[in-house]
Image (cartoon, helix red, strand yellow):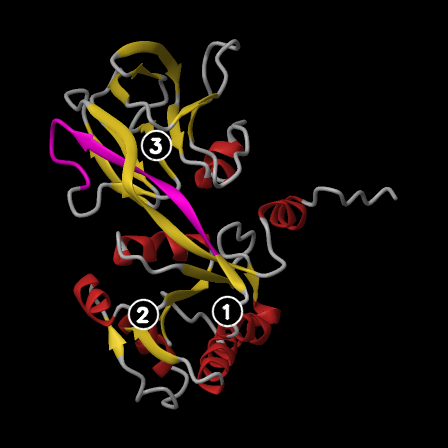
Amino acid sequence: MKVFVYGLQVKDEEEYSYAKVLIEALIQEGIGILLYYQFANELRKYSDEFVDIATVARYEEIKKALPEATITLGGDGTILKVVTLIRDLPIPILGINLGRLGFLASVEKKIIKKAVRQFSAKEFTILERSMLELSSNKTLFTSFPYALNDFTLNRRDTSSMITIHTFVDDVLLNSYWADGIIISTPTGSTGYSLSCGGPILFPDSHNFVITPVAPHNLNVRPIVLPDNKRISIKVEGRTNSFMCTLDSRYETITSEYQIDIRKAPFNMKFVQLKGRHFMKTMNEKLLWGFDKRN
């Protein structure tokens, strides 16, 4: 068995200690390791004890090695970054949370050794999470036009609202007067969309959520629709510059852009360790079921 260990930075000695615990636990279980080259360089700032571990940097190298899983050290943002690297490869992700909330990186750093033992003993299931795909009449996100969490379109360089004409299968749904709009997958429903009043969807739901950002009309609310629909967007405003994002990546567009959002032709796979499930994550991260008054 071989795994790809991915991280972006090692901020301090404490984070290095968690990386060391992970690597040593993998070695103890007889699991082969591939390190992301940038993460390997970060580790070398603190010690040379892992310099002999092989490194990879590009999609093609990962495809050739084809590890059984990817283990990330960081937060949900780290997982969104590694998705752009492993792309459509059938490599499930196990996220270890060194950040704050961590809906995707659900393994807490204090149980790294236990998580590795469970993984080695194959005490897990594989969950598939849908992705969204972006296409446009102009060049946009050409290197990887897919997102695990969401697509967003927001105003830029102005305090005025923008108008976002939104169509579903070429039929007008609404013209939103708002600061922006979010189109999220079930995975992304616990992110930016949630903070703007959107609903939480179970990860295996086959839906999109359209959530307006600060809409002017009070009767405009988030809407859930099947993910077999195609969502088309045209935007206009007092300026001709708008901010468009796919997960953590962003580009600037104008009103000349016609954008289509649809379900991607592939899913992203995740490792769910035995004893973990979505409702438990909700309880822990959102403190559901925990009332300090009791």
What residue range appears in magenta? 126-141
Q: Quick check: 140 above or below 54?
A: above
Q: CA distance from mark 1 to mark 2?
A: 15 Å
- Quarter containing the C terminus: top right
Looking at the picture, which amino acid does disc 1 mark?
Lys
Q: Circle 2 — which element?
A: loop
Q: Which residue occupies the foreground of this view, 20 or 264?
A: 264
Q: Dot 3: few (<14), some (14–19), or many (≥20) neighbours within 10 Å?
A: many
Q: Which residue is mark 1?
A: 122
Q: Nearer the viewer, mark 1 or mark 2?
A: 1
Q: Circle 1 — which element?
A: loop
Q: Which residue occupies the foreground of this view, 111 or 127?
A: 127
- Residue furthest to the left in view is 138
What main secondary structure does the magenta stretch of the protein show? strand
Q: Which residue occupies the foreground of this view, 250 or 286?
A: 286
Q: Nearer the viewer, mark 3 or mark 1?
A: 1
Q: Which residue is mark 3?
A: 152
Residue 265 placement: quadrant: top left
Looking at the picture, which amino acid does disc 3 mark?
Thr
Residue 174, horizontal then vertical, whole percent = 36, 10
Q: Earlier in the sequence, mark 1 or mark 2?
A: 2
Q: Quick check: 227 above or below 100?
A: above
Kindly identify the residue that appears in the image at 61 percent across and 49 percent down.
281
